[in-house]
Image (cartoon, rainbow, N blue to C red):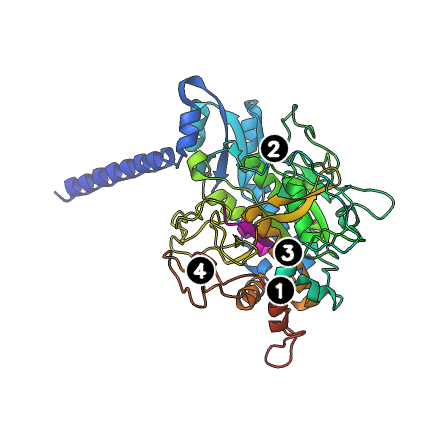
Amino acid sequence: MIRRNITAVALVLLCASTAAAALRRDARATVPVHPWVLEHTRNGSEASFFVVLRDRAGLLEARRIPAAPDRRRAVRDALWATAARSQAPLRSWLAERGIPHRSYYIVNAILVHGDRRLVEELSRRDDVLRIEGNPLVHNDLPLLPSSTALEASGEPMIPWGIERTRAPELWALGITGEGIVVGGQDTGVDWTHPALIRQYRGWDGSTANHDHSWHDAIHDAPSNPCGSDTTEPCDDAGHGTHTMGTAVGFDGNTRAIGMAPGARWIACRNMDRGWGSPARYLECMEWFLAPWPPGGDPSQGNSDMAPDVTVNSWTCPASEGCSWDTLREAIEAQRAAGIFTVAAAGNEGPACGTVMSPPGLYDAVFTVGATDAADALAGFSSRGPTTANQDHPDLIKPDLVAPGVAIYSALPGGGYTGIWNGTSMATPHVAGAVALLWSARPWLTNSIGATEELLARGARPLPEVIENCGGDYTVGPNNSWGHGLLDVVRSWELAAPSPRRPGGRVVP
């Protein structure tokens, strides 16, 4: 009787073990696969998609490193080591089968090209976390005006947006952004433009060296006016030149069109005349973390050449097949490294809940809406709350607003225009303000949380703008104008020259 009971128990345990194994197999087979991938691999079709691996680099210790170069190096090295170790088996598996792929380390992922059968095989691997798509995404950009060159004026020309945010008052004190590097992820930049050549990090005043200062993530656009894999900066649509002009532009004579004319800039082209993709966006973010030379690869990356702040006026809507998590992880890695990410809120207003696409809806970015010359909120400026944000569906966005209507700035070919509107035009005002603050208060450099707080506290509320999107419409924050209109002088005044911790130790 006892023996039969033992046998019965053994059979039960064996059945349970078998069932558990089956459940584990089923669990492996149910790795999340994004609907875009399933749709684009139907009926024998092939598509490019991301295989995101389970292993994650621990960045907590790296975030605590006070010195910016050491911190960036620690973040890059931790991410690199994790990707190299955990991707090795899958990369060997793909190589043995001749399957095209490209490895990323800023997010532990491999971009693969294949069919549904490959998707199904990969979804059953124990080391895979999820499978996501790589759709082409269209960004609506302003059209280049038919005549880009405007007549030069004999008087200093400072655009109204630069005046309204009070940057010239800091220039008068000798604060122009020296020592800070601004990165632009956009349609490229005309590096020879009179208002931008002096600030380009790849130019020493007589010769150009584009190593670590320019990267082209457009590899497959033979009809593009710039071509593909360009080895020097080029702008195929004008948008990147315009935004960089507002961040740092100055021609050395009359046209002071940028917030931080003493800062330097570098750039990565992530759009083919407005067409971006998650792969292009990730490649630029990976390059910003540790830039490598044109024609090189990420193994040659140098984190000492990373920018301090980046301008981001691109989008990746879920409606077009973009996924939430992977781009968020890349931006959080940049934040861990001390890179301040400024992003446009979007131009889907005035409805509430229209801050709805990466990167503007992420908590890890500083999101910017747009105002006009009367300090009124632009009708097109997207409003919160971020209902599409899976982690924070009620997050207050934008963080603040800046001039974004009829913004005068540079265009490719040496010209200028003052007719472009958008939160894209507002965003570089804030990136330039960060450059001014970090140049004036070195203790703030790469201290993202403290800088965000100063920008928010210094912003001027717009109490006449009353809407129903949620938040405090008297002093802010709210989901229309965030904490208010950018005022870089007030933020600078709030930042002590050298604050100290208890015991007299200077804050890193």
> Which of the 4 image quarters holds residue 216?
top right
Coordinates of residue 400 in the picture (x, y in percent): 52, 59
Whether residue 192 is situated above or below residue 441 in the rendered picture: above
Give the residue type that dot 4 points to: Val
Residue picked out by circle 3:
160
Do callouts 4 and 1 mark residues in contact (Cβ within 8 Å)? no
The magenta stretch is 331-346
Magenta-drawn stretch contains 23? no
Q: CA distance from mark 4 to mark 1?
A: 21 Å
Q: CA distance from mark 3 to mark 1?
A: 15 Å
The residue furthest top is 44
Mark 2 and mark 4 lie on one chain; the one further toward the N terminus is 2
Q: Which numbered circle lies on residue 465?
A: 4
Residue picked out by circle 2:
273
Whether residue 185 is situated above or below residue 231 in the rendered picture: below
SS at mark 1 in the image:
helix
Residue 112 visible: yes
Give the residue type that dot 2 points to: Arg
Mark 4 and mark 3 lie on one chain; the one further toward the N terminus is 3
Residue picked out by circle 1:
488
Residue 291 visible: no
Question: Is the residue marked by circle 1 packed among few (<14), some (14-19), or many (20+) residues within 10 Å?
Answer: many
Q: In the image, what residue occupies the spot 28% across and 35% down? A: 18
SS at mark 2 in the image:
loop
Mark 2 and mark 1 lie on one chain; the one further toward the N terminus is 2
Q: CA distance from mark 2 to mark 1?
A: 32 Å
Q: Nearer the viewer, residue 344 or 280?
A: 344
Coordinates of residue 278 in the picture (x, y in percent): 53, 37
